[in-house]
């Protein structure tokens, strides 16, 4: 497979350091060591991409993020940065230099719910104000990202309404477990309640005039299917034309695997060597047999483009239905939702269909040096001190 044949979809995890304390992600307890984080030299070795997501940890913790974006800008047609929105000044400064990049700020619900889930002081106001400022600056590709769970599902539609009024994108996800999230215990408890909230959102999206939102409706339909532990609606082709690269330069298929799967290392290899290596092929074979059934935008968006007729047909069907009813979509189109409602399957059975494993020991994928810094110190202490120092030197 020659990488120069076509552009890829890449996610660059620039750091594992994070200043938030999200209840569904323990990454903040397992930060990477700054000196080991992916360098500009390694970034320059990445292939051409049609889409690049920059993520973390919290990417804006890296004070050299503008240098990284400058390089990625040469390689990629479109860049979207996922952030918790805390470093407003840094985000605004970057947006001034690159007004065409996308910014997604994670907001987990209305003010109280968000601040409880994300554990960031004043997190909602900071995120919201940052988004508003970006909008006022004329940035087009800005929006909310929300990870839906039992605690915040009732806020799903109200938050969508706020984003809609502000003319913003609204990206959703649900709980996942993996080495990346340093978590194996995430699970949805009240599936019908969460699904009902998704159903309301799906109907609103379908009733909009935006084709992009109709396809978002399909993605959310897939989330209902996912939280009931059913096989993915679309095949997963991660590592074929899509990749993730972690702060250590390790190239991986995705961020959804239980343990880190490595195709090669871009610090020591060239892209073509790595992409065409036997190790990369082994990982591709594993992906073909992967049973984790994740439904995250990083793996679903490329699949929706590749298998466009599937979501396309779903949209057409529901738009036609929408001509006759104000409620074109029902969660009970999913057979599993009916089976659960009708007592044909139990909650215990559905729990076994999820990736939640209460006994799992999570391998966080940190390097030995990053692990060593955790002896005698917590990840939170390390990152808090790091940010304090940064503020004294760079943000004066
Ligand atoms: S289903 Fe795809 S995205 Fe999810 S863990 Fe498996 S290979 Fe990764």
Image: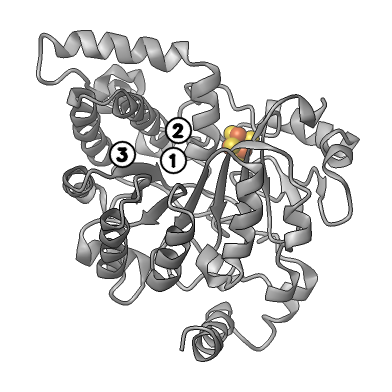
Mark 1 against mark 3, which lies toward the viewer?
3
Please say whether residue 123 is visible from this viewpoint.
yes
- Quarter of the image for residue 71 reads bottom right
Disc 1, disc 3: CB below 8 Å? no
Cα distance between the residues tagged 1 and 3: 10 Å
The residue carrying mark 3 is 191
Question: Residue 330: x and y, percent?
Answer: 22, 22
First along the sequence among labels 3 and 2: 3
Residues 380 and 266: in front is: 266
Question: Residue 96: x and y, percent?
Answer: 43, 60
| Total numbered labels placed on residues in the image | 3
Cα distance between the residues tagged 3 and 2: 10 Å
Vertical relation: 123 (above or below) 6: below
Question: Residue 101: x and y, percent?
Answer: 47, 49
The residue carrying mark 1 is 351
- Quarter of the image for residue 254 reads top right
Picture quarter with ligand 1: top right
Mark 2 against mark 1, which lies toward the viewer?
2
Q: Residue at x 69, y 31 (%)?
A: 287
Query: Going by the image, does 217 lie left or right of 324?
Result: right
Vertical relation: 352 (above or below) 189: above
Q: Residue at x 46, y 27 (%)?
A: 230
Describe the element under mark 1 as helix, strand or loop: helix
Q: Which labelled disc corresponds to residue 229?
A: 2
First along the sequence among labels 2 and 1: 2
Residues 242 and 221: in front is: 242
Cα distance between the residues tagged 2 and 1: 8 Å
Which quarter shows the N terminus?
top right
Q: Residue at x 55, y 89 (%)?
A: 393
Ligand 1 within 8 Å of the CB at mark 3: no
């Amino acid at each position: 497979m020659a990488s120069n044949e076509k552009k890829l979809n890449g996610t660059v995890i620039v750091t594992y350091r994070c200043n938030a304390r999200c209840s569904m992600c323990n990454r903040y307890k397992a930060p990477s060591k700054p000196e080991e984080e992916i360098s500009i030299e390694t970034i320059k070795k990445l292939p051409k991409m049609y889409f690049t997501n920059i993520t973390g940890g919290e990417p804006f913790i890296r004070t050299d993020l503008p240098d990284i974006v400058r390089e990625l800008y040469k390689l990629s047609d479109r860049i979207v940065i996922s952030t918790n929105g805390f470093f407003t000044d840094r985000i605004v400064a970057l947006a001034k230099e690159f007004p065409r990049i996308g910014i997604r700020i994670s907001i987990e619900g209305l003010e109280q719910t968000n601040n409880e889930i994300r554990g960031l002081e004043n997190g909602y106001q900071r995120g919201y104000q940052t988004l508003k400022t970006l909008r006022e600056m004329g940035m087009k590709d800005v929006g909310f990202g929300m990870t839906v769970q039992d605690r915040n599902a009732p806020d799903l539609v109200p938050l969508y309404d706020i984003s809609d009024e502000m003319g913003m994108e609204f990206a959703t996800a649900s709980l996942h477990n993996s080495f990346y999230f340093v978590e194996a215990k995430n699970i949805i408890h009240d599936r019908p309640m969460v699904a009902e909230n998704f159903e309301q959102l799906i109907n609103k999206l379908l009733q909009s005039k935006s084709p992009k939102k109709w396809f978002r409706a399909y993605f959310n339909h897939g989330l209902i299917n996912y939280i009931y532990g059913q096989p993915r609606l679309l095949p997963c082709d991660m590592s074929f034309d899509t990749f993730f690269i972690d702060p250590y330069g390790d190239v991986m298929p995705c961020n959804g695997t239980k343990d880190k799967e490595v195709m090669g290392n871009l610090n020591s290899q060239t892209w073509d060597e790595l992409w065409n290596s036997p190790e990369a092929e082994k990982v591709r074979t594993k992906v073909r047999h992967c049973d984790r059934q994740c439904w995250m935008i990083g793996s679903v968006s490329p699949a929706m483009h590749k298998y466009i007729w599937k979501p396309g047909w779903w949209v057409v069907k529901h738009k036609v239905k929408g001509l006759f009813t104000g409620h074109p979509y029902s969660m009970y189109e999913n057979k599993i939702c009916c089976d659960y409602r009708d007592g044909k399957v139990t909650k215990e059975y559905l729990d076994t269909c999820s990736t939640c494993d209460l006994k799992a020991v999570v391998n966080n994928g940190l390097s030995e040096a990053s692990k060593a810094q955790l002896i005698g110190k917590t990840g939170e202490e390390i990152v808090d001190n790091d940010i304090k120092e940064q503020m004294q030197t760079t943000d004066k």
